[in-house]
Image: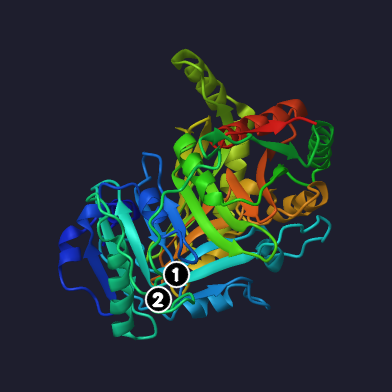
């Protein structure tokens, strides 16, 4: 029997010999040599005419930034949690339609892809209803995909993987052949090959190829477009007052820490895809993502574009659970000396260290609800990690799921994440509802994939732009403790906004 650490090393290393051996029934895997040298975003651009295009991209090199996945043309969609005690009941039934065997060498070969919005937490806990829901977006969006293109950035290989839906082997063969046709010529200087569509509804067949290149939103006809101007829904005075309110609640013993956020917004009815291309280049992240949410009548295209650095929860098919919460932030330095000084300040901060440890305790408790007794551990505590514009303190928690439990049980136990709510979690969520004027929507929810074999990987939706057809929004926030200086907390949100805003050529307008 292997240890958890040995298993973690094994799943991060592709088993190419196994991939070449006979596959389990119900799954398929094909090497795509021409795509190995292409950035996933360039391949995704060739499928942008398809419904439900979703790219989960590790755009930043690093310890765990290894896999990227591209899916499109889902066979089914969920756009609301299930009523009743289990908000994921419909999702469980939907993913069970796919063949369940694990595929050696490729963690995700088809399954559910999408997001669970922060407000699904209202289905899991009793909370007041005060903040205004003002975005025309589903609380939850999970699409079922029977194929995926997967990139292993460590080996430079790309794969087309698939799972049989409802036992129909011939259908999967037809679907994967259509994907191959659409991708033919990429990497060799050719254009995508157009094919007659088998249907125009999601899941009935891939649509005809559209060969084009996306034009960045900042350039139209060779003329630079005006930069997007974002305005905060909470003024500096209001944000400082909210921080003081949380500090008072902490002094009264109601809680230890809470995450407070403010939302920036600008009018926007364009295509968020061009913004994603800019975001991934200017603020590369371990959990980069683009999710096409379609269009509503009378409005523009809807979608999520994310450059999140933070894992929420992940689990392997055998039940090994990991979480990597982030708490504690400083900006990057203008030179090496300044960067080292900022890092030393962060590593030596009693306030940031205490905040991180508190959230680790919240997640240990959450994982303990579904993991085997004694299996929850903290192999790494408050290590330093750097992103494009900021540097963080990151911890790692691991555990082993109890027999009979799976990814949806893990989600229900840990959602929403402790790092973006507070401690104790429920009281922090109650205060968030009172102090933030609008509902968070997708922000601080979870985004990722769930396979029928029980594996899952999710990120926390921070550093994420939301296009709702009328506006483009970006939430920024931070953890508040009794030691928090309200003005410092305000400036931290400004620092956190600066990286993603600059990446898309935008800026915040101070009221």
Percent x, y for residue 379? 42, 44
Q: Is residue 34 visible?
A: yes
**Which residue is label 1 attached to?**
73
Q: Which residue is mark 2?
A: 205
Q: Which label was assigned to residue 106?
A: none
Residue 424 % position (x, y): 70, 51
Q: Residues within 10 Å of mark 2 (few under 14, many from 20)?
A: many
Q: Position of residue 243 (x, y in %)?
A: 78, 36
Distance between mark 1 and mark 2 Cα atoms = 8 Å
Q: Find out whether the residues at labels 1 and 2 contact each other: C-beta distance under 8 Å.
A: yes
Choose top left, top right, bottom left or bottom right for residue 62: top left
- Sooner in the amino-acid sequence: mark 1 or mark 2: 1
Residue visible at 79% across and 50% down in the picture: 431
Mark 2 secondary-structure assignment: loop
Q: Is residue 118 left or right of residue 237?
A: left
Q: Is residue 391 left or right of residue 437?
A: left
Q: Is residue 233 above or below residue 498?
A: below
Q: Nearer the viewer, residue 436 or 220?
A: 220
Q: Nearer the viewer, residue 26 or 359?
A: 26
Which of 216/65 is in front?
A: 216
């Amino acid at each position: 029997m292997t240890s958890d650490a040995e298993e973690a090393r094994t799943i991060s290393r592709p088993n190419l010999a196994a991939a070449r051996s006979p596959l389990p029934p119900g799954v398929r895997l094909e090497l795509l040599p021409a795509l190995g040298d292409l950035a996933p975003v360039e391949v995704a651009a060739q499928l942008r005419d398809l419904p439900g295009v979703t790219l989960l991209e590790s755009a930043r090199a690093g310890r765990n930034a290894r896999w990227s996945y591209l899916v499109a043309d889902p066979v089914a969609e969920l756009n609301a949690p299930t009523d009743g005690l289990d908000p994921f009941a419909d999702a469980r039934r939907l993913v069970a339609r796919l063949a369940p065997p694990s595929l050696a060498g490729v963690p995700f070969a088809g399954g559910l892809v999408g997001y669970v919005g922060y407000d699904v937490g209202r289905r899991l806990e009793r909370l007041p209803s005060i903040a205004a829901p003002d975005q025309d977006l589903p609380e939850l969006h999970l699409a079922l995909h029977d194929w995926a293109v997967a990139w292993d950035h460590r080996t430079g290989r790309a794969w087309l993987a698939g799972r049989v839906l409802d036992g129909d082997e011939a259908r999967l063969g037809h679907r994967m052949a259509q994907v191959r046709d659409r991708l033919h010529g990429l990497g060799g200087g050719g254009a995508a090959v157009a094919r007659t569509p088998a249907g125009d509804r999601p899941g009935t067949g891939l649509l005809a190829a559209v060969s084009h290149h996306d034009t960045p939103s900042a350039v139209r006809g060779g003329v630079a477009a005006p930069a997007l101007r974002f305005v905060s829904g909470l003024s500096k005075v209001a944000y400082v007052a909210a921080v003081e309110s949380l500090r008072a609640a902490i002094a009264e013993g109601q809680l230890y820490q809470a995450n407070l956020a403010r939302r920036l917004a600008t009018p926007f009815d364009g295509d968020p895809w061009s913004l994603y291309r800019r975001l991934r280049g200017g603020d590369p992240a371990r959990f980069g993502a683009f999710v096409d949410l379609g269009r509503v009548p009378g409005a523009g295209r809807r979608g999520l574009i994310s450059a999140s650095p933070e894992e929420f929860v992940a689990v392997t098919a055998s039940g090994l659970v990991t979480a990597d919460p982030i708490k504690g932030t400083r900006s990057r330095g203008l030179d090496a000396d300044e960067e080292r000084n900022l890092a030393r300040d962060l590593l030596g901060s009693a306030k940031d260290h205490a905040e991180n440890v508190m959230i680790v305790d919240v997640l240990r408790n959450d994982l303990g609800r579904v993991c085997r007794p004694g299996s929850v551990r903290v192999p790494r505590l408050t290590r330093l990690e750097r992103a494009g514009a900021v540097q963080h303190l990151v911890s790692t928690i691991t555990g082993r799921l109890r027999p009979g439990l799976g990814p949806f049980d893990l989600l229900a136990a840990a959602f929403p994440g402790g790092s973006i709510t507070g401690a104790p979690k429920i009281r922090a969520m109650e205060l968030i509802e009172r102090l933030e004027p609008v509902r968070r929507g997708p922000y601080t929810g979870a985004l990722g994939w769930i396979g029928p074999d029980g594996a899952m990987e999710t990120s926390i939706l921070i550093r994420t732009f939301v296009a709702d057809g009328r506006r483009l929004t970006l939430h920024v926030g931070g953890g508040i403790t009794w030691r928090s200086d309200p003005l410092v907390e305000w400036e931290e949100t400004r620092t956190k906004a600066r990286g993603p805003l600059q990446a898309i050529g935008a800026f915040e307008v101070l009221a």
